[in-house]
Image (cartoon, helix red, strand yellow):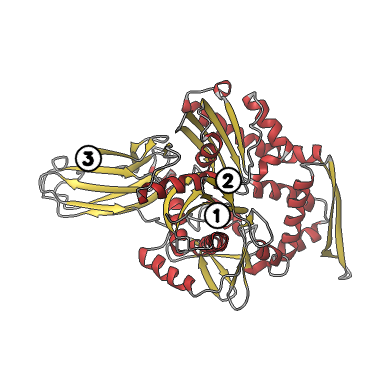
């Protein structure tokens, strides 16, 4: 049976794992690193270097090195998150032809799916080198609160990288699968997942080999990058105004400050205080380069980042309320993501849930291992082999889905935290006399107002019979597959006229563009 890999495509770091002879292996690079920076660096020849080697290029090639691209994928160029990123990252973010953010490096513009594909192709290559044979199938994880656009874009990135994506799995769900497999547990589990760019909390009910997600909530723009940012602002405030302006104008200086912030954060995970030293951050009035020196205590750091920590528990409240549970109902607590190594996070989570997090769970690797378990299960099922795990994974859709109605409202058809795969239908009527066609607009979100939700796409049902308003009945069918990706069909009952759409991300790539980019990437010299 061919191998299928599990990929945790992270904001800061990615991990790839595989099940071989019934055992999970996390695949290292040539230097033994088991986590791989989600960084792509382009030289002037446009050849891409990925991973730890790309990370080393950031200081020398800040505007040609792309990091934290996961925070932008599947969004619109005008979204709040993208506007914020354009003021903080050194590389150039520009508008794409689908109103999507794209990244200009040197003389070429890349879609976010292309950037993701370079990372996925690199991980695919690591797996093939380690296994000694081709790998063409994968399960890829995403934050639980990713919407349909973001999931579609991630699947497209996998296809461009030459992978058949068997399933998109929510990161906390994958972590719970790795934690609970084979332990015959019967308990509620909270998975607190704070990574480099996103935060998710999922409440699952594990019943032996059945893993049922009860509720999920999240913030797709809350993670380690934000902790770094507030620390950068703290350090910037120690400089005179003119030197602050120098740093903000200089991509290289901002990157030095970011790297220093990351290192200080890491140091304070094990020490009570740390020295921050940056060579040649700014120039004085005579034009001479000046270093930056500062001291930061863990107490100061905790005070600086406390508002961000507090935001995670507002999301936890939301998930527990949706699950109709209280913190004391949770029988196990699993921490996921590099940020959970921070003492302030560990202490705050323990206080909130009233229990010690599970020991022996590697927060950097557990998501990828869970994805590999699911990949092995799906591959075994496809090949007709005996499925070793026998697990049943029941996930949920993180946000409500509906259609736009007269007056700018949204009629919900599928509520958030509904089990997937799922389907439903609703009957609507025409709103205008002699209406010959109707536009079906699909939205995702919790607001009753269409403008406050994410528009996933639209299509037109034509050829309706002329009739007074309200006489023509149209049935709208919603289907969500196991990856959380949506298909919508509308049908007029009397004539059988129908139209449908498998929602391509409204800010994403067409099927033809994905195919073209896959061909282009086949000829790229991707650094390993």
Q: Secondary structure at mark 1?
A: helix
Quadrant (top left/top right/bottom left/bottom right) for the C terminus: bottom right
Q: Residues within 10 Å of mark 1 (few under 14, many from 20)?
A: many
Q: Disc 2 vs disc 1: Cβ atoms closer than 8 Å?
A: yes
Residue at (25% x, 52% y) in the render: 500
For mark 1, what is the residue?
70
Q: Residues within 10 Å of mark 3 (few under 14, many from 20)?
A: some
Q: Quadrant of residue 30?
A: bottom right
Residue reaching furthest bottom?
45
Q: Earlier in the sequence, mark 3 or mark 2?
A: 2
Nearer to me, 3 or 307 = 3
Q: Disc 1 vs disc 3: Cβ atoms closer than 8 Å?
A: no
Quadrant (top left/top right/bottom left/bottom right) for the N terminus: bottom left
Mark 1 or mark 3, whichever is nearer to me: 1
* Residue 163 position in % (x across, y down): 45, 60
Mark 3 or mark 2, whichever is nearer to me: 2
For mark 2, what is the residue?
198
* Residue 249 visible, this orientation: yes
| Mark number displayed over residue 428 | 3
- Mark 1–mark 3 Cα distance, whole angstroms, equals 37 Å
* Residue 94 position in % (x across, y down): 53, 65
Nearer to me, 302 or 84 = 302
Q: Secondary structure at mark 2?
A: loop
- Mark 2–mark 1 Cα distance, whole angstroms, equals 9 Å
Q: Earlier in the sequence, mark 2 or mark 1?
A: 1
Above or below residue 440? Residue 44 is below
* Residue 248 position in % (x across, y down): 72, 60
| Mark number displayed over residue 331 | none
Q: Earlier in the sequence, mark 1 or mark 3?
A: 1
Above or below residue 49? Residue 206 is above
- Mark 3–mark 2 Cα distance, whole angstroms, equals 37 Å
Residue at (66% x, 45% y) in the render: 338
């Amino acid at each position: 049976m061919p191998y299928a890999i599990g990929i945790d495509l992270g904001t800061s770091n990615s991990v790839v794992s595989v099940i071989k002879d019934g055992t999970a292996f996390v695949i290292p690079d040539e230097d033994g690193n088991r986590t791989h920076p989600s960084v792509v660096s382009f030289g002037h020849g446009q050849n891409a270097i990925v991973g730890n080697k790309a990370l080393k290029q950031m200081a020398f090639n800040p505007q040609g090195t792309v990091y934290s691209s996961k925070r932008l994928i599947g969004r619109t160029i005008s979204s709040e998150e993208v506007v914020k990123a354009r003021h903080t990252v050194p590389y150039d973010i520009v508008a794409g032809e689908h109103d999507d953010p794209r990244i200009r490096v040197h003389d070429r513009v890349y879609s976010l799916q292309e950037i993701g594909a370079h990372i996925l192709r690199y991980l695919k290559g690591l797996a093939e080198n380690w296994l000694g044979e081709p790998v063409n199938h994968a399960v890829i994880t995403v934050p639980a609160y990713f919407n349909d656009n973001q999931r579609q874009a991630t699947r497209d990135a996998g296809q461009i990288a030459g992978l058949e994506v068997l399933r998109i799995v929510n990161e906390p769900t994958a972590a719970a699968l790795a934690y609970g497999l084979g332990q015959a547990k019967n308990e509620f589990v909270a998975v607190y997942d704070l990574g480099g760019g996103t935060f998710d909390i999922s409440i699952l009910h594990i019943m032996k080999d059945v893993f049922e997600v009860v509720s999920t909530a999240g913030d797709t723009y809350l993670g380690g990058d934000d902790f770094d940012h507030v620390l950068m602002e703290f350090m910037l405030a120690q400089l005179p105004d003119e030197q602050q302006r120098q740093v903000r104008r200089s991509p290289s200086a901002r990157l030095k400050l970011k790297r220093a912030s990351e290192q200080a954060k890491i140091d304070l995970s094990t020490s009570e205080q740390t020295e921050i030293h940056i060579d040649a951050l700014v120039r004085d009035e005579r034009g001479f380069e000046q270093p930056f020196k500062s001291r930061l205590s863990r107490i100061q750091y905790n005070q600086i980042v406390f508002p961000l920590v507090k935001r995670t528990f507002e999301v936890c409240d939301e998930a527990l309320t949706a699950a109709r549970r209280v913190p004391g109902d949770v029988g196990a607590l699993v921490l996921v993501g590099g940020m959970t190594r921070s003492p302030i996070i560990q202490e705050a989570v323990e206080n909130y849930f009233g229990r010690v997090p599970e020991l022996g769970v590697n927060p950097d690797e557990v998501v990828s291992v869970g994805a590999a378990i699911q990949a092995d299960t799906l591959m075994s099922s496809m090949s007709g082999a005996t499925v070793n795990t026998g697990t049943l994974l029941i996930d949920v859709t993180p946000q409500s889905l509906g259609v736009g109605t007269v007056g700018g409202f949204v009629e919900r058809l599928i509520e958030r935290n509904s089990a997937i795969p799922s389907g439903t239908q609703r009957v609507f009527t025409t709103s205008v006399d002699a209406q010959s066609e109707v536009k079906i607009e699909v939205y995702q979100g919790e607001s009753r107002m269409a403008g406050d939700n994410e528009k996933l796409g639209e299509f037109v049902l034509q050829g309706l019979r002329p009739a007074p308003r309200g006489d023509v009945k149209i049935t709208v069918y919603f289907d969500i597959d196991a990856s959380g990706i949506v298909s919508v069909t509308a049908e007029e009952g009397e004539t059988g006229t129908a139209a449908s759409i498998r929602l391509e991300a409204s800010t994403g790539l067409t099927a033809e563009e994905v195919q073209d980019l896959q061909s282009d990437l086949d000829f790229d010299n991707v650094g390993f």
